[in-house]
Amino acid sequence: MSGDLKNSCTRPCSFTGTHRENTRDTQDHTPASPAAIIVLPESERKETLRTAFMKARILVTRPPSNAALVELRRRFSVEANEQGSAWSAEELRLRAADKDGLLISGADRIDGPLLDATPKLKVVCNVAVGYNNIDLAACSTRGVLATNTPGVLDETTADLTWALLLATARRLPEAERFMRAGQWQGWRGDTFMGRDVHHATLGIIGLGRIGLAVARRAHGFSMKVLYHNRHRLSRKVEQQWGVTYATLPRLLRTADFISLHLPYSPEVHHLIGEKQIAQMKPSAVLVNAARGGLVDDVALIAALRSRRIAAAGLDVFESEPNFNSGFLELDNVAILPHIGSATQVTRQAMFQLAVKNLTAALAGKRPPSLLNPAAWKNRRR
């Protein structure tokens, strides 16, 4: 009998009626007194065995691959969305009703009504670094742990940020559409004149892990890097990374390229709106590969249409996936479908970290990427 099965019994027990038969494959052969041996009824024996070996029930809303599911099913009883299309809030609530854990994407909303409909739920694991899709307060009050996947996608998201920055600076989307339309008639000196990136000034709003990865790349282009954080870094760190602190108004007035790298919260809703855009250079380029809602999309569309700023590169939008169709009418914006972390290696690493968080939580251990420590003491068991 395994150690796990021994521990599943609430009192000393024998499934065969004799202690020696029950322990002959273990190291302990010390005879037990007759009073210590209790033979369970057949129905109770079956229930104890079922409980001891039953796997935790898991719901996966966006599995990265079949191989990942195969590995996950070795440890858990898994229900997965293998069709690719997103579930509605009601369908997610119904499917999650009897689950112990959820592996979700940043597009899945976890709120009070869902948590109230899932009394067995112990942990919600976001396969994303952002977590504005999870109501942390609602999770904490109900004893449900919530986790994310920080660290493993920093470099990949920084790469995508630079792809947007370069594409908008050199007007690559416009030029590519021009070629596909068969409009190129030969070389001209004024065709798709762009902006130099090298030796320009980059302004980073939110100098965390991803922001620092972007700053490192900027030095390869001999750029001056300004940054704005809620809390300024130490002089030593600023010197180490070659960055200069600026107030938000100064950064907006000075930077040739402005890149956002901070999580969304109600406090920073529309951090970049009509007033902030009005402070930017007419030649400025805005890049957002962080979170929708940080930028007022209506104000940005108006500014791009009037050429108040030169261009924008966007991987995120308000109300995804139902983004403002006004962007489609503009030729000075590069738009992507939220693919900042979309490489095979990185997405797999994100899923593996989410599974690590899930496994720890269901084993009664503190997950490595716990978002709501306040829930730990009163967590569901």
Image: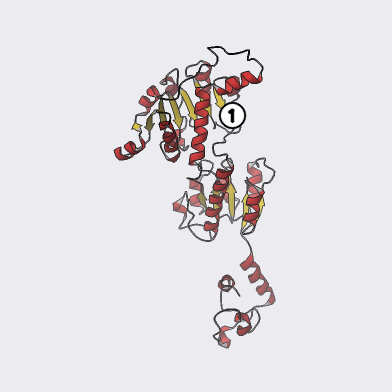
Residue 89 lies left or right of residue 225; in this view the side is right
Q: Give me the residue at 43% from left, 41% from top.
A: 209
- Residue 232 visible in the snapshot: no
- Marks counted in the figure total 1
Asked which colour scheme the image uses, the reply is secondary structure
The reply to whether residue 145 is in sight is: yes
Q: Amino acid at mark 1?
A: Phe
Residue 276 falls left or right of residue 109: left
Front one among 254 and 231 = 254
In the picture as drawn, the residue positioned furthest to the left comes out as: 235
| 21 vs 313: above or below | below
314 on left or right of 39: left
- The quadrant of the image that shows the N terminus is bottom right
Q: Is 12 located above or below residue 218 in the figure?
A: below
Instruction: Return the residue nearer the eye: 368 or 48.
Output: 368
The image position of residue 173, as x and y in percent, is 58, 23
Question: Callout 1: helix, strand or loop?
Answer: loop
152 vs 285: above or below: below
Question: Residue tagged by mark 1?
Answer: 323
Image location (x, y in percent) of residue 170: 51, 22
Task: Using the image as rendered, state which of residue 283 and residue 54 is in the foreground.
Answer: 283
Q: Residue at x 52, y 24 (%)?
A: 168
**Residue 251 found in image quarter:** top left
Residue 47 x/y as whole percent: 66, 70
Looking at the image, which residue is at 51% across and 49% down?
147
Graded by Cα atoms within 10 Å as few (under 14), some (14 to 19) or many (20 or more), the crowding at tag 1 reads some
Residue farthest front in this picture: 187
Q: Position of residue 33 (x, y in %)?
A: 55, 87
